[in-house]
Amino acid sequence: MGYVSAFILTTNTIDVILVQTLYQECQDLLRTFQGGYLSNDEFNRLVNQAQNYLFKTLLEDTSVDRYTNESLSPFRKEATITKSSGIYTTPTDFAEIREVAVEFVLPSGETEYRPCYLITDLGLTLTSPIRKPTKKTFGYTKDVNFKIYPSSNVKMFLKYFSKPVQTERKVTYSGDDEVYNPTGTVNLEWNETDKSMVLDMMLFYAGVAANMPDIANWIQLRNSFVQSESRDYVNRKI
């Protein structure tokens, strides 16, 4: 049972960013900095550009511990995947691997999780007496989907980062006026405490960086993410 503790299923508690609140704050700041007005379509496009960039940057920034960083907590997912037609199907929201393990059933009927490591050279690994995967230490390859070696009917336990869900603020129209409609609206999965980070990036994409030099510097440096208890990752002077 030595492998169980490393792969205990966990549940994330997510305090999401409400898209309507973000929309209102964004429009207020645009008026403040004479940045104009965003239509609903423009807002939806910018908010998704911003969150996709932030997500990618957090995963790639070497100064960020992706396993403990709180901003990434909504995107740390887990799944148990059953083998089908020789493969383990990748989750539809998959972005990047965190860990892979194998759910192995012992002769006693108990289940333990055994390590499963990436195989980079399949031919060499499978023929090597040292590197060859075993039922104590499995190996996996990934193309579109996963394969596990040695081949058996074990289940794969996958810890991964999920892609941010595409945010959408829905509206109906009254004449030329856009009226917010909560039905069908998709909020951001990010923690509510990271709203300023998303908002800053949206304002940059909206073209108000000339009035907000800190944002421009943040984009250029790409290293302004620092862990703190308050999770205030962007130094703002507005």
Image (spheres, rainbow, N blue to C red):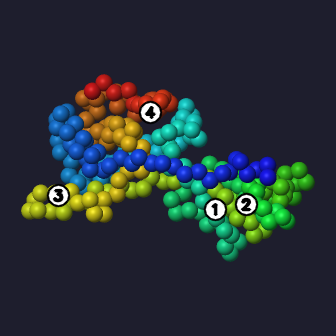
Residue situated in front as seen by the camera: 235 or 2: 2
Graded by Cα atoms within 10 Å as few (under 14), some (14 to 19) or many (20 or more), the crowding at tag 1 reads some
Q: Label 3 sits on what residue type?
A: Val
Q: Residue at x 51, y 45 (%)?
A: 73
Disc with the residue nearer the chain's start (3 vs 4): 3
Instruction: Tell me the amino acid under the disc marked 1.
Output: Thr
Density class for disc 4 (Cα within 10 Å; few <14, some 14-19, many ≥20) is some
Q: Secondary structure at mark 4?
A: loop
Which is more N-terminal, label 2 or label 1? 1
Which residue position is annotated with label 2? 103
- Find the residue positioned furthest to the top: 237
Q: Provide the residue designation for mark 4.
A: 231
The mark that comes first in sequence, 4 or 2, is: 2
Q: What is the secondary structure assignment of the residue under circle 3?
A: strand
Q: In the figure, is residue 77 to the left or right of 29? A: right
Q: CA distance from mark 1 to mark 2?
A: 8 Å
Q: Circle 1 sits on which residue?
A: 80
Where, by quadrant of the figure, is residue 65 drawn? top right
**Residue at image x 34%, y 37%?**
196
Of the numbered discs 4 and 1, the one sitting upstream in the chain is 1
The residue that label 3 is drawn on is 179
On screen, residue 217 versus residue 13, left or right, reads left
**SS for callout 1:** strand
Tell me the residue at 64%/56% (across/down): 158
Look at the numbered discs 3 and 4 and tell me whether their residues touch, using CB distance below 8 Å. Answer: no
